[in-house]
Amino acid sequence: MNDNVLLKIKEVSHSFGAKKVLHDIDLEIKKGEFIALVGPSGCGKSTLLNAIYGTLKPERGKVLVKNGNHALSSEEEILSTNKTKKISQKFLEVTRPNRNCGMVDQQYKLFENRTALRNVSIGPKLDETSIPFRIFKPREWKKIKEQHHFRAMDILKKVGLENDAYSLPRELSGGMRQRVAIAQTLIMKPKVLLLDEPFGALDEATRESLQKLLLGMYAENRQAIKKGEDPPYTVFIVTHELNEAIYVANRILGLSQHWDWRSLGYSEHPGATIVFDEPAPVFSPDDQRDFMKFKSLQEKIYKIVIDKKTCKEREEYLRMIVELRNNKKHKDGEIDEESQI
Amino acid sequence: MIRDTISTKQRIVIGIFAVLLMLVGYNYLSYRQHQIEPKDTTIPTMTQFQEGIKQFTAVDIHGERWITKDARTTIKRLFAGLSLSLFFGFGLGILIGCKARWYAFFYPIIAFASSIAPTAAIAIFFVMVGTGFEMYVAMIIFGVMPILTQNVCDEVKNFPIELLNKARSWGATEMELVWNIIIPHILPRAIMSFCLQIGPAIVYLIPAEMLVGHDGFGYRIRLASKLQNMNIVYPYLIMLALFLIGFRNSLTELVKILFPWYSDSDSHILNFIKWLKSFYNKLKIN
């Protein structure tokens, strides 16, 4: 098993009442990857993201995230019922929002009672200090608080909001609020940064600057890898903009409900599944943004993922995935039989 | 046109005009009543009002004035009842708002209690706590606390779940979620909800004093109205109303000062201080 894997989505399926939304999603996300999930409206992209974040428990399957504590050198997976092993196990089943994943959602809600600076600095405050510490050690807390404010100001500079650090959220425009929400998550340096259509409400100029911010983060990953260090950022972004997905990501996943489920033996539609998984070209922040460069890839993704019409490539991909899984199950079954013998 | 706006000056002038009109109307009614019955005290003249005010501001044989004694007694009862209601109502509201099991346990009791008019249940208070100070405080708590608890609970439940999840993803403990996230957000709302309960608290207290009290505003109003001395009753009612308006406005101002993010308009006190400062600076320059 690859030591670079940060997140595992194992056979996740979910439905809302009678409506089946997700079917058998099986993915691994490695350190340093920038993954864009695209798909038609209403196919279940946000549902999958919420399952990864921990605000939604999938009906079947589980989401596993690499835990911060790596006491064990073995790569044994946690059993969800075995709570005593939780602390020292390498992978933690995601059952609720946790420190390993940070999310920027579509509504970009902020704390209305805090300025932009304090909205960003509250994360480190909650993570690094406790209530008794703040009450009984006020002088030390004051020093740490100043450090948090410096860090928050740095992040706000990165997203271009240093002049609005002392504004309340109601004094900020939608785009500025979204940038504060992004800064709130960036300062926490989560293992996996989840973005749910983060640039949807922004104007083109702000969108471009934040896309370049993501490219800058990917460039930092590449520099870290060159130095032999772990890449600091892993991003999973949900977007309905194909251009954006290809521009910022190095891997594109396509989730679609438009696949030929009958040919695979289902009597009713089991939900959307992954129908596309390919690398994307990598850009640097200094490259000029030219969407014509990846027009053919865009058309390919549209044909396989978005378009309702029957698509040969889509069905071939799914057959290949089903075959691979059956082979894997067969091998696991053989190993079990041998061990019994 | 609907939703037309007028200037502050216009608003003040029209308001003063309305009050003056009311005073003129009252004086006319009083005059007409005194034409029919010269010794009437049900619609007192200004002179009769002066006499009434002299009566309750004069020092009595115990060395006290009626107004100070009654105000002290009533305010003590009111503040004791309101403070305890706020303390328990806020705490219980947070608890049941955060925890589903506590909500399932307490909510039916609170919903039932909030549906009972405390004044109608006054006999229960006689039996449980007697007719002393504790009875008035218990009545206010019984009347105010369930509604305050419900309001605080609703505010907690309406707190955006996305923000709670964000805080959890930053490593916040459950206690930190309550102390650092929920309470600062709902505090101004809880205070405004409390503000709205001051009127009902007075409504529970004054009739109780009228029924069984030996002192306080309600007691004085009962005594004066028995003798039809409305020149004492009306001023007492006006004082109660002014007290309520003053208390509510003070709390609203406090919320605007302490929680500037919550209110749409700025605090009048802070605006006045800003104006004073700019006026002083202008004078300095000149």
Image: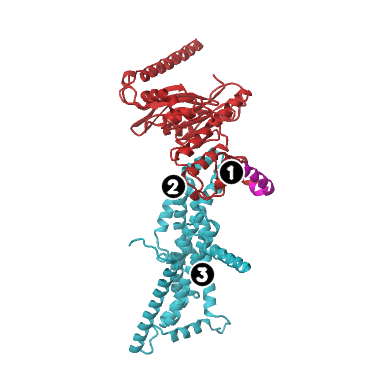
Subunit that carries the residue with mark 3: B
Count neighbours of disc 3 (C-alpha within 10 A) and say few if under 14, some if 14 to 19, many if 20 or more: few
- The amino acid pointed to by label 2 is Ala
Count neighbours of disc 1 (C-alpha within 10 A) and say few if under 14, some if 14 to 19, many if 20 or more: many
Residue A50, percent from left and from top:
45, 34
Q: What stretch is highlighted in magenta?
A: A134-150
Residue at mark 1: A121
Residue at mark 3: B132
What color does chain B have in the rendering?
Answer: cyan
Q: In the image, is residue B241 above or below residue A55?
A: below
Subunit that carries the residue with mark 1: A
**Residue B122 is covered by the magenta coloring:** no
What color does chain A have in the rendering?
Answer: red
Which dot, 3 or 2, sits closer to the camera? 2
Q: In the image, is residue A24 above or below residue A18?
A: above
Nearer the N terminus, badge 3 or badge 2?
Answer: 2
Quarter the C terminus of chain B occupies? bottom right
Residue A165, percent from left and from top:
56, 47
Residue at mark 2: B104
Q: Which residue is found at the position 53% from the left and 56% from the top?
A: B259
Which dot, 1 or 2, sits closer to the camera? 1
Considering the whole magenta stretch, tell me its main secondary structure.
Answer: helix
Same subunit, labels 1 and 3: the answer reads: no
* Circle 1/circle 3 CB separation < 8 Å: no
